[in-house]
Image (spheres, rainbow, N blue to C red):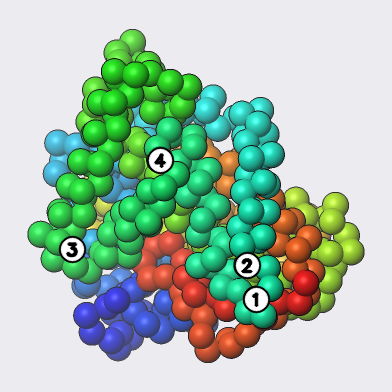
Amino acid sequence: MADRAVTDWRTDFDHTDEGWVADPYPIWEELREECPIAHSDRYGGVWLPTRHEDVSAIANDTEHFTSRSIIVTNHRPPMELAPQGVAPPISSDPPYHAEARRMLLPAFSPQNVAKLEPSTRAYCAELLDAVQGRDVVDAAADYAQHIPVRVIADMLGLPQADGDVFRGFVHDVIEGVARPLEERAEGFLALFGYLQGHIAEHREQPRDDLISFLLDAEIDGERLDDFQVARTVALLLIAGIDTTWSAIGASLWHLARTPADRERLVSEPALMPTAVEELLRAYAPVTMARLVKEDVDYRGCPMKAEEWVLLSFPSANRDPRFFDRADDVILDRQPNRHAAFGLGVHRCAGSHLARMEIKVALEEWLRVFPTFSLADPDAVRWSAGQVRGPRLLPLRVDA
């Protein structure tokens, strides 16, 4: 959380502030109208565009903004990491980025994702069987957080039993942004130490999983070294867990407090794919960052080299200039050109996988618990940082 309370969202914002974490939507609405590109001196300087037009423009501008690091902290990664960045390909700049992303796409194709649906559905059913008989179920802690952990662990070839370890890595990387560099470094060393052990094991004993796939992959005719493999696996592990876990939880939170939408999905199950897109739009979990490459004036904002730009895709998704009835959840909204998976060259390579997991998780929950509500709205707790989703979500269920 922020080390001190925010005094003015236009000039002193902090995305880890308790007010932002609890409910950022009024903050974004105010800024879009009064100060569409806010600035704060925190984290060594950070800008916050809140309108879809500006978020999209900066996300697409790889000339003036680098993706060398996409998590706002008090520290900048060394320039030597460019163009790969901290976690390629999401942290990579052109032209390297295109090849690094293209290398991953086959693993996340619709055809490959479809093969994972039966096991994902079976695991969701297993989780729901384990909470049968309860009046209150924590849909975040007992359900949502486990699903992407199992899916990505199986894809990577990592032990299913290490779920708590993975969630610890997620917390260190995504939520612990205000901690001292020494503490953050310890978390990163633990993450890479863990991954390097499994990468070495995969080199000795190749198998049919993503780590072995990366060890065999080439970029520009050259094999990836172990450090590059580790950074890519770190991205897949962290991003593959936190974002989807958050999206599933936020969707269940919405359905718990909106009986009409819940009842409609129960009675119209064919609507689920369209509904998932709208829930992603309305509760987009991910905010990404860029670093300013060199001093640039963007629409009257004097952005200095190495300042952050926090790209709020969730705010862009609520911009009434781009979406009709932007604050309303319309389950059959079409078309729906939301930015939940990002904008520009860094659009999420795992979007098919995320959609499948969210769809299956909601379908299975509604199959077992067609009627549910918030057990205690005040007990819901949301994550801090650039991925937002419920971490505690007690729901009263009626099977």
Disc on the earlier residue, 4 or 3: 3
| Residue at left offset 44%, top offset 28% | 210
- Point out the frontmost of discs 1 and 3: 1
Disc on the earlier residue, 4 or 1: 1
Q: CA distance from mark 3 to mark 2?
A: 41 Å
Asked if the residue at tag 3 contacts the one at tag 1, i.e. Cβ–Cβ closer than 8 Å, the answer is no
User: Residue tagged by mark 2?
Assistant: 131
Q: CA distance from mark 4 to mark 2?
A: 23 Å
Disc on the earlier residue, 3 or 2: 3
- Is residue 115 among the parts visible in the rendering? yes
- Point out the frontmost of discs 3 and 2: 2
The three-letter amino acid code for the residue at tag 2 is Val
- Where residue 57 appears, x then y in whole percent? 46, 51
The three-letter amino acid code for the residue at tag 3 is Asn
Q: CA distance from mark 4 to mark 3?
A: 33 Å
Q: Quadrant of the C terminus?
A: bottom right
User: Residue tagged by mark 3?
Assistant: 74
| Residue at left offset 78%, top offset 60% | 367
User: Residue tagged by mark 1?
Assistant: 134
User: Residue tagged by mark 4?
Assistant: 159
Per the image, label 4 sits on a secondary structure element best described as loop
| Residue at left offset 64%, top offset 40% | 119
Q: CA distance from mark 1 to mark 3?
A: 44 Å
- Where residue 145 appears, x then y in whole percent? 50, 59
Taking depth in this image into account, of 320 and 197 the one nearest to the observer is 197
Per the image, label 1 sits on a secondary structure element best described as loop
